[in-house]
Amino acid sequence: MTAPIRLTVASLETQSPSLRRLQGDTQPACELKLLLSEEQALAVEDRCRLELLLDPHCTNQSSPGYHIKSLYCDTPEWDVFHRRNRFRLFKFRVRQYGSSTQVYLERKSKKGIEVRKKRWCIPLQQLGLLNGDAEQDWEGSWFHNQLIRNRLGPVCLIEYERVAYYGSSGSEPVRLTFDRHIRGGLHHPWSMTSQTFSMPILRNQVVCEFKFRGLLPPLFKSIIHELQLTTSGVSKYRHCIDASGVLKQEQKNYA
C-alpha cells in the first residue's frame, strides 16, 4: 500500500507558489501547462534536475513519484466543462495524496496563467458531510456553502502519478510537476475510492506544469526555447469528461 503523504507547514517550501502565501507577497501566482511526449518530459526533467530539488514526497515512495486523486465538481448542466459565465474562472475539487486519511477541499480560480487557490484539510471520513446539511461551524463549511450556491456536485474522479521538483528564482518559489499514467471516469459519490471502469486519459502523454510567481523564470524560459516546446491549456477534467462520452450521450438523448 502506498504510504500516506502529509503536506504540513514544515513542507511549505515544496508546495505550489499559489499555496505558499507569505507576508509581503506581491507577485501573482502563475501556472503554465505543457502536454509532452515521454521523450520531451525526460528531456525537461534532465534539464531542471541540475537546478531544482526533488520534492521530498517523491523520495519516500517505492515509485519515483506520488499518487494523486482529484474528485471534480460540476453543475447538472455541465457549466464548468463548457466554461459558461463565471464558471470559466474556477473549479472546485477534492484532492487526496497517496493513501492519506486526510483530503483537501480546494477552490482553484484561474484567469489566463494567473491562479489562486484556497484549500482546507479535513479527515477523509468527513467527506460525506458534503452530501447533507453540514454545520456552519464545520471547517469545511465554506466549501459546502459554495457547492450549494453554485449547484455543484461530484462528477468524475481522476488519478495519476506525479513527480515534482522545487526551488527558487531569485527570492520567488518555483515548482515543476510531471503527471503521468492519468486515468479517470465518471464518479458521483463523495468518495475517493477508485472505480473499476476508470479509463486511461491522455495515453502516453505527460502533463507538465511550470509554477512560479510573476514573470516566467529564466530556467523555465530557457527550457521552452532550447527544447522548442509549446504551451497548452490542457485540462485533465475536460479530457476525462470527453473520454467518458457522457455529453455525447446527452446530446443524442435530446436530439
Image (spheres, rainbow, N blue to C red):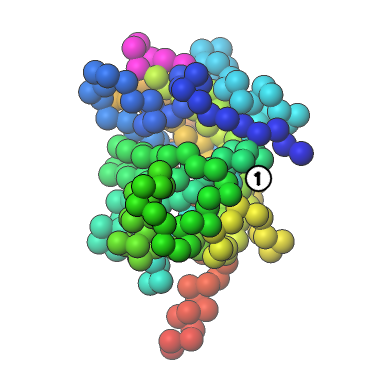
Q: Is residue 202 visible?
A: no
What residue is drawn where x is 69% and y is 63%? 197
Instruction: Point out residue 144 in the picture as x, y percentages from the top left corner.
Output: 39, 55
Which of these two is toward me, 24 or 241? 24
Residue in front for this viewpoint, 246 or 19: 19
The stretch in magenta equals: 167-172
* Residue 75 found in image quarter: bottom left
Q: Which residue does the image show at 40% across and 44% down from the upper left?
A: 139
Position of 105 relative to 72 (above/below): above
> Picture quarter containing residue 16?
top left
| SS under mark 1 | strand
Label 1: how many Cα within 10 Å (few below 14, some 14–19, many 20+): some
Pointer 1: what residue? 181
| Quadrant where the N terminus is found in the figure | top right
Quarter of the figure with the C terminus: bottom left
- In the rendered image, residue 200 lying in the magenta stretch gets the answer no
**Along the viewing direction, whichever of 191 and 34 lies nearer the viewer:** 191
Q: Considering depth in this image, is 221 or 140 the residue closer to the camera? A: 140
Give the number of callouts.
Answer: 1
Q: Is residue 230 above or below residue 92?
A: above
Spot the residue most to the bottom.
255
Name the residue type under label 1.
His
Judged by its main secondary structure, the magenta piece is strand
Q: Residue at coordinates 33% horizontally, 56% vertically from top-left?
A: 145
Residue 171: x percent and y percent? 34, 12
Q: Residue at image x 56%, y 40%?
A: 102
x and y percent of residue 164 in the render?
Answer: 56, 28
Could you tell me residue 20's position as x and y percent? Answer: 38, 25
